[in-house]
Amino acid sequence: MTGSTNPRNWLSRRPRLCQYRKNRSIMTTSKSFVLNSIRMSKTFRYMSRFDGRVALVLTLLLLVPCRATAVFTIEIKEGVEAGIPIAVVPFGLQGVDGLEHLPADIIQSDLGISGKFEPISRNSFLSRPTDLKSVQYKDWRLIKAEVLVVGKVINIGNGQYEVRFRLIDVFRERQLVGQKFLVPMNRLRRVSHQISDLIYQHFTGKPGAFDTKIAYVHVEGEDPDRVFKLQIADSDGYNPKTVLQSSQPILSPAWSPDGNWISYVSFERKRSMIYVQNVWSGERELISEFQGINSAPAWSPDGRRLAITLSKDGNPDIYIYSRDDGSLRRMTTHPAIDTEASFSPDGRMLVFASGRAGPPQIYEMSVAGGEPRRLTTGQYNAGPSYSPDGKTIVLITDQGNGFRVGIYSNEDRTGTVKELTDTTQDESPAFAPNGEMIIYATQQGGKSLLAVVSTDGSVKQTLRFQQGSVREPVWSPFNRKL
């Protein structure tokens, strides 16, 4: 080991180890099983020692629906000081039963939680137009609406519905955006998210991320009946589906670039193993089961390689695994711990956390090879990943105030990290596919939950689950199939 601090010491400083010890959330009471925790912020967190036989329950599920309602509720903690005043009028319904206000409700919720819009209460509406011709502009100027959304859902038969919407500038009295969609009933919620995305993009210049998914690990029950579920849900918490269920921990989920696969770490066979699983068919592929640590899978932009952490050669180091031929290429050889690698958007660089200087810091190196270069300074920085445009790196930082989500500029490269949150037990940050928001896990009031923060720190939300605890969040890429 190099440096004055044993690199393994910084693993135990991460907040989830404290959380797990307090809540016993991954510890089984079986005498035949001893699970020793080692904390790394997004990667391998547990080294296992097994004695005797372990009762194991593992279920592979083909996107089994969990419930019809949202799995969590979204609470806005902070938003921009002056969001755009927008009125979302309930859509007109023609030949449609049971969908009253549904598209408008979804759109209003999406835009409201973005923090960039200020939806106006429908109680103040003086009229309720459903098309451009019926808009009385004075009605909307009186309630200080700057933008208006109107639309219709029309049953055209054969199980198909036409959804029309118009985005209208109240002061200039003209249409800004208009579009219609032809979809079956079960796509109406998704079309509503797509309308929200179009509105968001019109005003911000960036695509919205409402029509995307999130993946996370949901933990339910108490020892010895604790259950770990790898789940995916819509970005607003609806339509949760379980991809994998196990009696043993599931860690570090990561989406493939096409959104069709999820990689993760499973402890189902008495040790850590890395799998990739198709979220549609349930097909699974075991890619790493070496002795020791198998952890922290991260996809390359082309989906053909994964950066992983292995200790098979004696120390945790970064390797690149090829899905084409199953080959491994070792990237780091330092005696300190190197882990949590992430590919740059162009696939040419890797960023990772290392204890080679003592406490963990962020390093960057070429995928082609060569010496890593240190990026960050300060007390503690770990769990890095690039933004979709590669201009920034999100990470977990401890600058003396606890473990918080931070962001590092990959353009000015000063070594400093800007804190985005004010909590003290944050972990596992991941960018939205548009690079505008960051989802992460945290603790509030002794409860594990997810939260979202904008990349400038101005918009903050919490995602409170109805039951159990949740961790390891990751946002899906843009993918029409999802």
Image (spheres, helix red, strand yellow):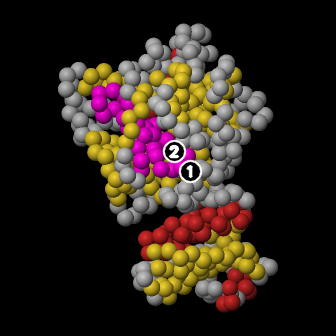
Which segment is the magenta one?
A: 250-279
Which residue is the extreme one toward the front? 325
Where in the figure is residue 354, as x and y percent of width and height?
A: 58, 22
Where in the figure is residue 382, as x and y percent of width and height?
A: 58, 29
The disc labelled 1 sits on which kind of residue? Pro
What secondary structure characterizes most of the magenta part? Answer: strand
Relative vertical location of residue 246 with respect to residue 155 in this rendering, above or below: above
* Helix, strand or loop under label 2: loop
The disc labelled 2 sits on which kind of residue? Ser
Relative vertical location of residue 432 with respect to residue 101 in this rendering, above or below: above
Q: Nearer the viewer, residue 196 or 146?
A: 196
Residue 370 falls in image quadrant? top right
Callouts 1 and 2 close, C-beta under 8 Å: yes
Residue 16 falls in image quadrant? top left
Residue that appears at 67% across and 18% down = 371
Mark 1–mark 2 Cα distance, whole angstroms, equals 8 Å
Relative vertical location of residue 193 with respect to residue 80 in this rendering, above or below: below
Residue that appears at 41% across and 44% down = 277
Task: Inspect the magenta stretch and tell me whether residue 272 lies in it.
Answer: yes
Q: Earlier in the sequence, mark 1 or mark 2?
A: 2
Which residue is the extreme one toward the bottom? 134
Task: Inspect the magenta stretch and tell me whether residue 302 lies in it.
Answer: no
Judging by the rendered image, the residue that carries numbered circle 1 is: 477
Q: Estimate how packed mark 2 is, as few (under 14), some (14 to 19) or many (20 or more) residues with alpha carbons within 10 Å.
A: many
Mark linked to residue 256: 2
Q: Point out the image quarter for the N terminus.
A: top right
Where in the figure is residue 296, as x and y percent of width and height?
A: 48, 32
